[in-house]
Amino acid sequence: MLVSACVTKYRVLVIEEEALLRLVLEDMICDFGHEVIAGGGTLQEAMELASASAFDVAIIDMRIQGILTFPVADILVRRNLPYIFATAIMPADVPSPHRGRPVLTKPFEHDKVRRVLDEILAGSSPRVAV
């Protein structure tokens, strides 16, 4: 008897303002064998999900409705949870403790998303994807 090899590896919180990009990212994450536990598109949703959800890593859109999402990342720092920023345009000044965090650039590329997720989940020093 064969047992399915499809096992969820990690739970990933996805915060992305644009619904189409969120769906693309969620599909990639599922392709990697991970589970998307939630997807948020507003800053309020993002803060609530970051505060109360159970997940292993978060991917956070760096701007939602024109507002930088560093308060969401602050919540993750307090919870000691790893996170990855997603952005089309990097802000000029990223405050500490968020400097040096991994960044996925938009549009998302399958191999880069996989590499950055694998690195952060393996506990290795994450690199910035360009």
Image: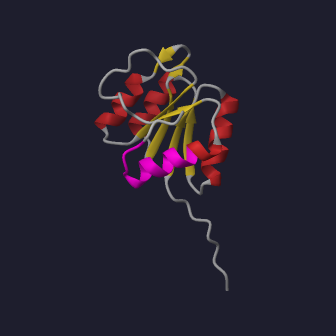
- Main secondary-structure element of the magenta-colored stretch: helix
Residue 12 appears at what percent x and percent y?
51, 46
Residue 76 appears at what percent x and percent y?
36, 35
47 on left or right of 22: left
Residue 96 drawn above or below residue 108: above
Q: Residue at x 67, y 86 (%)?
A: 1
Range of residues picked out in magenta: 113-126
Q: Residue furthest bottom?
A: 1
Name the residue nearer the viewer: 25 or 89: 89
Q: Residue at x 49, y 54 (%)?
A: 10
Residue 28 appears at what percent x and percent y?
64, 46
Name the residue nearer the viewer: 94 or 71: 94
79 on left or right of 83: left
Magenta-colored stretch includes residue 125:
yes
Say how the picture is coloured: secondary structure
Q: How many marks?
A: 0
Quadrant in which the C terminus is drawn: top right
Residue 117 appears at what percent x and percent y?
50, 47
Residue 42 drawn above or below residue 129: above
110 on left or right of 56: right
Displayed quadrant of residue 14: top right
Q: Residue at x 44, y 31 (%)?
A: 48
Residue 79 drawn above or below residue 46: below
Magenta-colored stretch includes residue 115:
yes
Displayed quadrant of residue 87: top right
113 on left or right of 78: right
